[in-house]
Image (cartoon, rainbow, N blue to C red):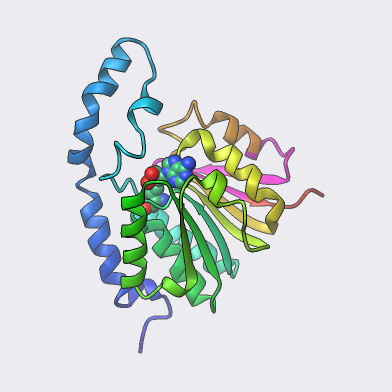
Amino acid sequence: MPNPSSLRNEPLKGVLERLHAAARGDRFRGLKLAPRLALGFLARRNLWREVLTPEAMKELYIPVSPEQGQLLYLTARAIGARRIVEFGTSFGISTLYLAAAVHDNGGGLVVGSEIEPGKHARAVAHLEEAGLTEVTDVRLGDALETLRELPEPIDLVLLDGWKDLYLPVLELVTPRLRPGAVVLADNIFTFRKSLRPYVNHMQSGEHGFVSTTLHLADGFEYSVYLGKG
Ligand SMILES: C[S@@+](CC[C@H](N)C(=O)[O-])C[C@H]1O[C@@H](n2cnc3c(N)ncnc32)[C@H](O)[C@@H]1O
């Protein structure tokens, strides 16, 4: 009998194992960027926005960890998510977890977003290989444009693109969230300073969210939308 979670069944199981293994090579591919970042550090300039462009990082997966992927899947199953939005799809690892949950919940749509054309093409191919094309729509281009039109109400959002855009993307999606929607945001620890305004926004209690930072992987901000009250 097949497992009730598609994550445990082929073809998805094999696709995820292969992609997580390939992503472990990021530590070597990323070394190419180290000299310029180090120079910026020595010159006391924060060059990450200039150096870490989507073009420069087009070979890097920088995915959610397997544990974060499991949390995405379980959360989406727990709340019966049918409409999910993702900022930052890369090669599609997180999208695969989210799409599996939507599929296992009975169908719906994960709207992804990726600005780098090569990554977008690879993500679409991985979703096809996993048999999840029907529940996904990965849009090519700047998320601030491609996520303007969205199915409503949104049940779950993953923020995992460039960090200075978390708040602008959140502003785009907030009016479409259903009460009880979950918003997850990655890399809270590495980008502690740049993401402080985002974390403050979510934790202040003034914008309809309750929120906490999970010590999972690189820090996962887990927020629940309670509505405007
Ligand atoms: C950390 S990676 C996403 C990893 C992915 N969520 C996963 O778990 O496999 C961030 C991605 O966001 C993309 N990105 C950056 N700025 C973007 C923008 N304005 N619109 C859409 N995608 C963007 C980058 O090209 C990069 O592939």
72 sits to left or right of 56:
right
Residue lying farthest to the left in this orientation? 28
Q: Residue at x 48, y 36 (%)?
A: 163
Is 48 contained in the magenta span? Answer: no
Residue lying farthest to the top in this orientation? 43
2 sits to left or right of 141:
left
Q: Residue at x 58, y 43 (%)?
A: 169
From what the image shows, is residue 226 above or below residue 151?
A: above
Is 204 contained in the magenta span? Answer: yes
150 sits to left or right of 158:
right
Quadrant of the rendered structure where residue 199 is?
top right
Q: Residue 36, percent across and down?
A: 25, 22
Q: Residue 74, percent across and down?
A: 49, 65
From what the image shows, is residue 149 above or below residue 76?
A: above
Indicate the quadrant containing the N terminus: top left, top right, bottom left or bottom right: bottom left
The magenta region covers 202-223
Residue 96: in sight, yes or no? yes
Say which of 144 and 39 sits in front: 144
Quadrant of the rendered structure where residue 100 is?
bottom left
Q: Residue 162, percent across and down?
A: 45, 38
Q: Residue 9, percent across and down?
A: 33, 77
Residue lying farthest to the right in this orientation? 229
Residue 160: in sight, yes or no? no
Q: Residue at x 54, y 40 (%)?
A: 166
51 sits to left or right of 161:
left
Q: How many marks?
A: 0
Q: Residue at x 59, y 70 (%)?
A: 80
